Image: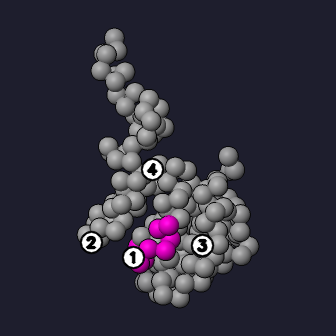
């Protein structure tokens, strides 16, 4: 027998995910405007939690994420670009001019990667996938893993990155001399996603 409380939980989950049953969509009790206001908090942890939370709102957070692409904190810009790439649709289309600027931002390679990812997700693979592929040879582990993860999240349309991902994996697979298993794992995960059948 299903307990009555289960229905309350289902209703709550639907309300959080879709806004069904309430006028203003809320995540963890806060609205898009609430989280957008936290982006200017002096505490970086609060800012980063806010930008991550905005992504959960999907299209409803498009305007706030677009504004965040000009935030002074590079980590906020990075996360805003990634979230826009994941959301897609009209918010991503509106963000393309700013993302194109950020794809050439010499002050932050991480922001370049995120912007390139979002633009690839927006259909500009030929123009921007190369930046992610090049970073697979970067000397810093974090950047390489980030590039591999973003390529994987592009999916099968990033098939031209397969050769570079295979090289990254072979150099860093378990047992490879001088390899880095973090990079090897990130490359393998990306390969699985890029090779997966189209939905």
**Callout 2 crowding tier (Cα within 10 Å): few <14, some 14–19, many ≥20:** few
Q: Earlier in the sequence, mark 2 or mark 4?
A: 2
Left or right relative to 122: residue 75: left
Which of discs 2 and 4 lies nearer the camera? The answer is: 2
Front residue (pair 122, 141): 122
Q: Write down the residue under mark 4.
A: 56
Q: Disc 3 to disc 1, how far (Cα)? A: 15 Å
Residue placed at 64% from the left, 54% from the top? 89
Q: Earlier in the sequence, mark 2 or mark 1?
A: 2
In the rendered image, the vertical position of residue 127 relative to residue 159, given as above or below: below
Residues in magenta, as a range = 67-75
- Kindly identify which numbered label has been placed on residue 73: 1
Q: Earlier in the sequence, mark 3 or mark 4?
A: 4
Horizontal and vertical percent for residue 165?
A: 59, 72
Q: Disc 2 to disc 4, how far (Cα)? A: 23 Å
Q: Are the two marked residues, 3 and 2, in contact with CB atoms closer than 8 angstroms?
A: no
């Amino acid at each position: 027998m299903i307990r009555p409380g289960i229905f309350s939980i289902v209703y709550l989950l639907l309300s959080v995910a879709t806004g069904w049953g309430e006028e203003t969509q809320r995540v963890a009790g806060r609205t898009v405007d609430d989280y957008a206001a936290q982006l200017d908090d002096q505490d970086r942890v609060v800012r980063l939690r806010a930008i991550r939370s905005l992504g959960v709102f999907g299209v409803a957070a498009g305007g706030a994420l677009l504004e965040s692409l000009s935030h002074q904190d590079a980590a906020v810009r990075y996360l805003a670009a990634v979230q826009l790439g994941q959301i897609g649709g009209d918010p991503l289309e509106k963000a393309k001019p700013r993302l194109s600027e950020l794809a050439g931002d010499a002050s932050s390679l991480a922001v370049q990667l995120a912007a390139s990812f979002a633009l690839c997700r927006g259909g500009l693979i030929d123009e921007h996938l190369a930046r992610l592929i090049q970073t697979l040879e970067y000397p810093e582990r974090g950047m390489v893993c980030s590039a591999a993860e973003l390529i994987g999240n592009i999916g099968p349309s990033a098939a031209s990155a397969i050769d570079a991902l295979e090289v990254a994996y072979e150099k860093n697979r378990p047992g490879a001399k001088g390899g880095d298993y973090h990079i090897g794992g990130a490359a393998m995960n990306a390969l699985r996603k890029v090779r997966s059948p189209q939905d």
